[in-house]
Image: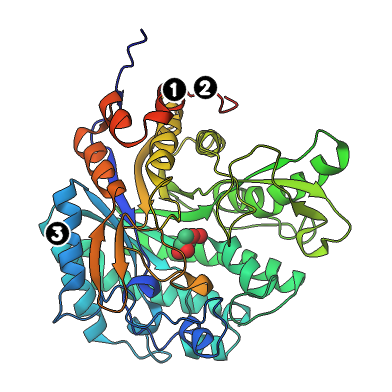
């Protein structure tokens, strides 16, 4: 009989959950996503409303969730600041908003939960949106000024800063696919925004380090695996384009100081900076097939490979692919910087597949660490079911289930599992046996993962 050894994680590894202001705080009425919801653009017709009700200081729901996280044994939590609260009108700074963030951050620290704070997680203040959002000519300096304000006001409570969350996802969904505000379909605008966000990241990184030299600063990049569906030239060509434009170009801009959006046209240097870590959000693999009918995705159509295990709608073109987490860590490891998995998670209201998802992804992460990738922490997306952009309340990523009407919380089994992993700083055979026995071989042997 094979005896499996526990997979131990490095000492001081950070175990956390990731959240975002608009998806958790509630009543973020002063940003472009709120306006987009009100205009009826969400797929299920719902609005964010109270979200998980983290903003209200009287009801203390954020504080109660933080206590739950501490009890589980989590030692870090990622949240974002809402620009439209901190700077509600251009050049007007709201001290009451800063006070509430100070309360939340102080509470996390009291519980020995290290806060990781993101400056931009998709939403823009209405005043900025009215001036063209990320197409406004001065957006980089506006963002830099906001970053400087946030660091001056909160820097004593935060050591880990993320500048921008998923620049390519934002640019692509808002200005190419048009599913997010302002609903455009323009390649040039999409590339322009991607380039602007790389520049804004650099400007914010400088602004943070100028005020807080010891702070650790990084960008958060959504990093899917793109593979060709078939072993032929056309599929390889189009999946290569997606990999280049969606993944590689941003890494080059941020870690190699070479800005090349789009393609090789308009290549230029960007100022040299000091990124302290690489933030990676990983959700799965997209296999690409050449198709003349898919001009908006550069003639690459996402097609499920035969026999693959896919996500449910609305992300049914995404494959559950734990080995991809190993691969993205290997890609990032070439830059020889600390890596944080700033998001990884699965939408599964019934929580039937999530325990296996967690275990197999963490096993892949463990393998990446064994191979030399300097991974310092992992943030599961997300803690309590929160409001999912245009998908609304229909997708449930939480370790803890939420009834948005009553705000009642009910931990799922995955919360119990994740707590056990965090407290042990390891995955043990007993955990796998208890939560997902069918995953025993893939967790401890990683068989069948294309390793
Ligand atoms: C990521 C986003 C996060 C959430 C998850 C499911 O792309 O950063 O806000 O929507 O996907």
Q: How far apart are the alpha carbons under marks 3 and 2? A: 38 Å
User: In this orientation, does residue 349 appear?
Assistant: yes
Q: Nearer the viewer, residue 336 or 233?
A: 233
Residue 409 sits in which quadrant? bottom left
Identify the residue under disc 3. Answer: 67
Residue marked by disc 1: 441
Q: Is residue 164 visible?
A: no
- In the figure, is residue 77 to the left or right of 294? left
At x 23%, y 85%, the residue is 95
Q: Are marks 3 and 1 in contact (CB under 8 Å)?
A: no
Q: In the rendered structure, are the residues bearing label 2 and label 1 in contact, judged by CB atoms less than 8 Å apart? A: yes
Left or right: 25 as drawn, with respect to 72: right
Residue at point 29% right, 53% down? Answer: 412
CA–CA distance in space, label 2 to label 1: 6 Å
The tag earlier along the polypeptide, 3 or 2, is 3
Viewer-nearest residue: 37 or 277: 37
Mark 3 vs 1, N-terminal side = 3
Above or below, comparing residue 424 to residue 94 in the picture: above
Q: Who comes first in sequence, dot 2 or dot 1?
A: 1
Q: Which residue matches tag 2?
A: 447
């Amino acid at each position: 009989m094979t005896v499996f050894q526990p997979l131990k994680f490095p000492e001081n590894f950070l175990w956390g959950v990731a959240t975002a202001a608009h998806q958790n705080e509630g009543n973020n009425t002063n940003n472009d996503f709120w306006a987009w919801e009100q205009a009826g653009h969400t797929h299920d017709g719902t609005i964010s409303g109270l979200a998980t009700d983290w903003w209200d200081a009287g009801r203390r729901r954020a504080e109660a969730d933080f206590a739950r996280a501490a009890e589980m044994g989590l030692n870090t939590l990622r949240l974002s600041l809402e620009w439209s609260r901190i700077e509600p009108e251009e050049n007007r700074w709201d001290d009451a908003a800063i006070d509430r963030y100070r309360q939340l951050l102080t509470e996390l620290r009291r519980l020995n939960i290290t806060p990781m704070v993101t400056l931009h997680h998709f939403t823009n203040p209405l005043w900025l949106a009215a001036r063209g959002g990320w197409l406004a000519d001065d957006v980089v300096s506006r963002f830099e000024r906001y970053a400087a304000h946030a660091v001056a006001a909160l820097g004593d409570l935060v050591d880990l800063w993320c500048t921008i969350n998923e620049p390519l996802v934002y640019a692509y969904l808002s200005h190419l696919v048009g599913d997010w505000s302002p609903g455009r379909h323009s390649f040039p605008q999409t590339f322009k925004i991607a380039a602007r966000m790389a520049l804004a990241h650099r400007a914010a990184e400088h602004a943070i380090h100028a005020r807080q030299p010891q702070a650790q600063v990084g960008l958060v990049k959504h990093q899917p695996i793109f593979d060709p569906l078939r072993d032929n030239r056309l599929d390889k060509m189009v999946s290569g384009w997606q990999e280049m434009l969606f993944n590689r170009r941003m890494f080059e801009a941020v870690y190699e100081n070479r800005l090349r959006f789009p393609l090789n046209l308009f290549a230029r240097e960007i100022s040299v900076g000091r990124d302290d870590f690489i933030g990676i959000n990983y959700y799965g693999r997209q296999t690409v097939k050449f198709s003349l009918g898919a001009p908006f995705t550069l003639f690459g159509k996402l097609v499920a490979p035969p026999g693959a295990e896919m996500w449910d709608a609305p992300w049914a073109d995404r494959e559950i692919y734990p080995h991809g987490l190993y691969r993205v860590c290997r890609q990032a490891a070439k830059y020889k910087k600390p890596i944080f998995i700033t998001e990884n998670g699965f939408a599964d209201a019934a929580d039937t597949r999530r325990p296996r998802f967690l275990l197999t992804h963490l096993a892949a992460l463990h393998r990446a660490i064994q191979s030399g990738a300097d991974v310092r922490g992992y943030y599961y997306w997300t803690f309590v079911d929160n409001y999912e952009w245009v998908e609304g309340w229909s997708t449930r990523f939480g370790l803890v289930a939420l009834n948005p009407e009553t705000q009642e919380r009910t931990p799922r089994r995955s919360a119990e599992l994740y707590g056990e992993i965090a407290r042990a700083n390891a995955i043990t055979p007993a955990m796998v046996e208890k939560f997902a026995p069918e995953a025993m071989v893939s967790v401890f042997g990683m068989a069948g993962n294309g390793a």
